[in-house]
């Protein structure tokens, strides 16, 4: 009864829930950008009176934490981050099936994500992979503007490209999986090896490379295009590139952790996070993903996925536990150990 009353109040837009204000805290694991995590935490607290303890980590790190805590779960909801580790967590029975009453307001791709995982996760946003470069640095160096994935392997960009480590970052794992799908496994790993020769650093966070590019610490950062756009909007001289060969994309996801100590509150957050009101918060923190609620606000600065050359990304295969582990092990052995 408590769960249904709470969910109903949220869906009706109630902002004062005195009867539930004294409920136990909600432990939120967040894998989106820090500012977005913070506004989600604060806004849910304001909407419900439920205190939220939020931890922000990359999707790969959060998946590892959920896995490590399986026998004694400490988190309740995992919100944000690329869908592949969410799908892996679902496959390993680390997350809880749940069908939200908000489901009829979502885009088909968000629902397809849920159906592929037995309703143990759901799509909350989508975004295409690409890269960005610092236009001022490029001009000073007298270099041509990169337009394709292949350009990033050219010798003139040696030591000027940055991406995250696919073991910790969902963005970087999406990059690895995209190259394998675009070029075949042999061709994809050949590409990653040639790219490795130009990498100056593998970061922990997926968005860190474009922040470094914006600040002039690297010329090129491989990221989701919406993160590059956000860096430009923040005032940095970053140009966003949709690679000419085509590119992969993500379906950012949300999951309830199996054995959550605060299950009622977890489901309440889940329902709230799928509302137009919650998803409209993205634009307040310059998060330019395509949101899963069909009524959510859109920005003309956001990449238009309909105009991009997107691959038919196989989320089921590349989100599977065995395939992810295999690709990461192969990358660790064959790519990361190479000299630069």
Image (spheres, rainbow, N blue to C red):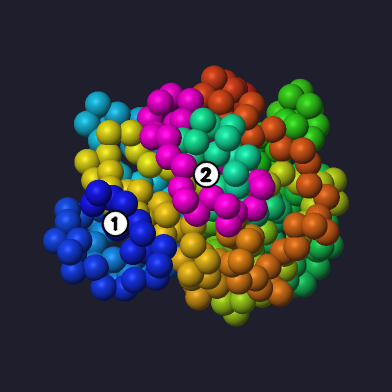
The residue that disc 2 covers is 122
Residue extending farthest bottom: 235
Query: Which quarter of the figure is the C terminus placed in?
Result: top right
Task: Tell me if 25 is positioned left or right of 208 in this view.
Answer: left
- In the rendered structure, which segment of residues is drawn in magenta? 81-109
> Can you give x and y, in whole percent of width and height, for residue 246 in the image?
81, 47
Residue toward you, 304 or 332: 304
Q: Which of 6 and 227 lies nearest the eye of the viewer?
A: 6
Around disc 1, counting alpha carbons within 10 Å, would you say few (fewer than 14), some (14 to 19), or many (20 or more)?
few
Instruction: From the top left corner, tell me how far across and down residue 252 is, in percent.
Output: 55, 49
Q: Is residue 201 visible?
A: no
The residue lying at 50 percent from left, 75 percent from top is: 284
Look at 69% across and 52% down and name the residue there. 128
Q: Position of residue 315 (x, y in %)?
A: 64, 34
Residue 326 shows in this picture: yes
Residue under the point 27% across and 34% down: 259
Q: Is residue 190 left or right of residue 54?
A: right
Which percent across, then down, holds residue 293? 58, 59
Within-10-Å neighbours for mark 2: few <14, some 14–19, many 20+:
many
- At horizontal 66% and vertical 47% (from top left) the residue drawn is 108
Residue 333 forms part of the magenta stretch: no
Q: Give the total of numbered labels.
A: 2
Which residue is label 1 attached to? Answer: 5
């Amino acid at each position: 009864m408590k769960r249904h009353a709470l969910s109903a109040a949220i869906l009706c837009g109630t902002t004062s829930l005195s009867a539930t204000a004294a409920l136990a805290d909600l432990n939120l694991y967040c894998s989106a950008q820090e500012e977005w995590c913070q506004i989600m935490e604060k806004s849910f607290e304001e909407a419900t009176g439920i205190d939220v303890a939020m931890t922000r980590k990359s999707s790969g790190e959060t998946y590892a934490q959920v896995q490590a805590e399986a026998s004694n779960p400490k988190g309740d909801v995992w919100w944000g981050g690329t869908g592949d580790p969410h799908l892996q967590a679902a496959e390993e029975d680390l997350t809880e099936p749940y069908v939200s009453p908000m489901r009829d307001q979502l885009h088909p791709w968000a629902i397809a994500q849920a159906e592929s995982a037995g309703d143990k996760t759901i799509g909350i946003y989508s975004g295409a992979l690409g890269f960005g470069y610092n236009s001022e640095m490029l001009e000073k160096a007298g270099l041509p503007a990169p337009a394709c994935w292949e350009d990033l392997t050219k010798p003139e960009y040696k030591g000027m490209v940055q991406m995250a480590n696919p073991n910790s970052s969902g963005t970087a794992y999406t990059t690895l999986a995209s190259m394998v799908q675009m070029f075949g496994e042999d061709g994809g790993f050949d590409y990653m090896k040639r790219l490795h020769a130009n990498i100056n650093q593998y970061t922990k966070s997926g968005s860190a490379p474009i922040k470094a590019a914006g600040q002039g610490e690297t010329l090129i950062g491989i990221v989701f295009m919406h993160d590059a756009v956000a860096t430009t909007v923040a005032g940095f001289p970053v140009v966003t590139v949709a690679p000419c060969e085509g590119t992969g994309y993500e379906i950012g996801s949300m999951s309830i952790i199996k054995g959550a100590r605060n299950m009622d509150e977890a489901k309440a957050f889940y329902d709230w996070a799928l509302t137009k009101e919650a998803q409209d918060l993205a634009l307040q923190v310059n998060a330019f993903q395509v949101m899963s609620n069909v009524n959510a606000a859109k920005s003309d600065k956001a990449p238009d996925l309909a105009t991009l050359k997107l691959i038919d990304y196989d989320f089921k295969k590349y989100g599977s536990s065995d395939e992810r582990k295999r690709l990461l092990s192969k990358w660790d052995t064959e790519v990361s150990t190479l000299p630069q």
